[in-house]
Amino acid sequence: MTADMAIGLDLGGTDLKAGLVTRAGEVTAFLRRPARAAVSADAPLEVVAGAVAELRRACAGPPAGIGLGCPGVIDPASGALVGRTPHLPHWDSLRARLAGRLGADLVVENDANAAALAEHRTGAARGARVSLTVTVGTGIGCGLVVDGRLARGARGGAGELGHLPLDGRYPCRCGVPGCVEPECSGGGLTARAREAGLDVADAAAVFAAAAAGEERAVRLVGRMTDRLGALIAAAVQLLDPEVVVIGGGVANAGDALLVPVRAAVGRHALESHRRGLRLVPAQLGERAGLVGAALAAWDAAGRAAG
Amino acid sequence: MTADMAIGLDLGGTDLKAGLVTRAGEVTAFLRRPARAAVSADAPLEVVAGAVAELRRACAGPPAGIGLGCPGVIDPASGALVGRTPHLPHWDSLRARLAGRLGADLVVENDANAAALAEHRTGAARGARVSLTVTVGTGIGCGLVVDGRLARGARGGAGELGHLPLDGRYPCRCGVPGCVEPECSGGGLTARAREAGLDVADAAAVFAAAAAGEERAVRLVGRMTDRLGALIAAAVQLLDPEVVVIGGGVANAGDALLVPVRAAVGRHALESHRRGLRLVPAQLGERAGLVGAALAAWDAAGRAAG
């Protein structure tokens, strides 16, 4: 008998989050392990395998499926990584290698897409026909739901919101002149603050300094939220969503991020498109990726059964 | 018995194009009439009604459906115009009024969406899962096909490519600061050329002057194609299409438009997204809108029958 659970995994450069997830997206078991990506190219595979073994033991019968969210461009047809991801190099045959190691096939999904699917089905974008989930962390991720379905693009590259050429002033490893990710991602904000002489550990520290009135931090947060609003405005004009969900680690700043980003979307988007648009915080927090990966596995199990 | 034809209509500010269209998108009868939009708010309704009567007479039995493409934001559920269109003011109850006048219901679709549907099913984007059709005319229109389906957005506003805030230097009636439509639409190019002292009737004349080496025209066409490429790059990074189709009156410039726009997309888009991307001229020319409107009517007839 197959269990009423799928295994969801969210593998980042820092850690692995994993859980048992019902068809409705409820998490009944959760664990977190260091990803060990710095140890060796294969170390994260062992971390994933260990977590899957642990969750299988907690599960009554074989899981309905296994889904893995990770950074990078995933081919929609094969689930293979297309091109490399800087956080997990040498992982282009990820799905085949993991399937061999686990003795079971699995679904691989881009982590931003997984988060968007989870927020759409069970979180802040529930009920919306068109939604956009923007993940503001080290970089900027974005997943699109169009007419109720995840839109992955022709080659898995949809949602590359961060690298739009919107008047960025710092070079980005992506190579696009004017790319704004170096100013409006968490990693970018931290780097700009350090260049300005602030002693900050991360983006949260820059927001804290701005809240305390530190002038350089205020200016940098102002620029960051303005450019993030311009990026979101561009996506809103192209896709006309009902809801834009803001998640990722930097979104823990709450209203200090949301309020100025809402104002910036108001400055940069057409009136017709911002009327009735909701810009809301993510509801699933750090679990969005694993829930979305598990939901993708549930979908694949349904297609196989149907 | 219902005929094997649908009636397709494409109503612009200048003229109405209409035709009989098979389920496969073949046009078997075509006519063009002045839209008479300047005469009165209702004059175009009479033009449409006259064309429909003429096409009905040419048709063996009642048509399978009637589809109308026109500018403006069309509500995906009701077919009503949301907000006004500058070329056809006072038309917010267009579908109901026309249905009453014609004695038959009809499908109303945004003209850029209709062109995108036609190019996707029977034209330059045939076979693509994700495509973008950009119509460069007086303004810039854009229709999106995502996973084989027209993506209209939550309120019919998807594809507002022209008004992205990409470093535009001239005010636009849309109100978005930095909007680039005043520099990269046909109307915008003509206006900029006249400001620069060139005596030009339209965008085609600016392209002709540039081809003859006129320095101001060369500079303006360079800026126009660079910004159009940046707009397309933004859409490509968000949607990851296989094909971008360029149509509209300005596309009659052929390679003088396409070659520099391809180069500009190369400058502004991520390498991962432009690899394998095709940027091609539209195949259906001025008939794309009416063919797409007729195909939308065929789809609606299929849903009603199924």
Image: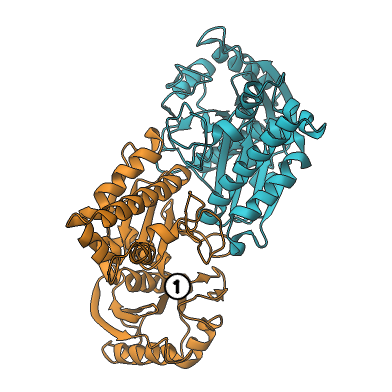
Chain colours: A cyan, B orange
The quarter holding residue A257 reads top right
Pointer 1 local density, CA inside 10 Å: few below 14, some 14–19, many at least 20 = many
The quarter holding residue B256 reads bottom left
Toward the viewer: A11 or B203?
B203
User: Is residue A165 shown above or below B79?
Assistant: above
Toward the viewer: A163 or A84?
A163
User: Is residue A30 shown above or below A122?
Assistant: above
Q: Answer with left or right where residue B80 lies relative to residue B284.
A: right
Q: What is the three-letter code of the residue carrying label 1?
A: Pro
Q: Answer with left or right where residue B61 lies relative to residue A173.
A: left
- From the top left corner, tell me how far across and down residue B295 is, in percent: 37, 70
Q: Is residue A41 visible?
A: yes
Element under label 1?
A: loop
Toward the viewer: B85 or A92?
B85
- From the top left corner, tell me how far across and down residue B80 is, in percent: 55, 76
Q: Answer with left or right where residue A10 lies relative to residue B254.
A: right
Toward the viewer: B299 or A151?
A151
Residue at 50% across, 63% down: B172
The quarter holding residue A147 reads bottom right
Mark 1 belongs to chain = B
Q: Quadrant of the N terminus of chain A?
A: top right
Residue reaching furthest top? Answer: A39
- From the top left corner, tell me how far across and down residue B94 is, in percent: 51, 82
Residue reaching furthest right? Answer: A212
Residue at 44% across, 16% down: A90
Residue at 52% across, 52% down: B165
- From the top left corner, tell me how far across and down residue A241 is, in percent: 59, 55
Residue reaching furthest left? Answer: B212
Count of marks placed on residues: 1
Q: Is residue B283 visible?
A: no
Q: Which residue is mark 1?
A: B71
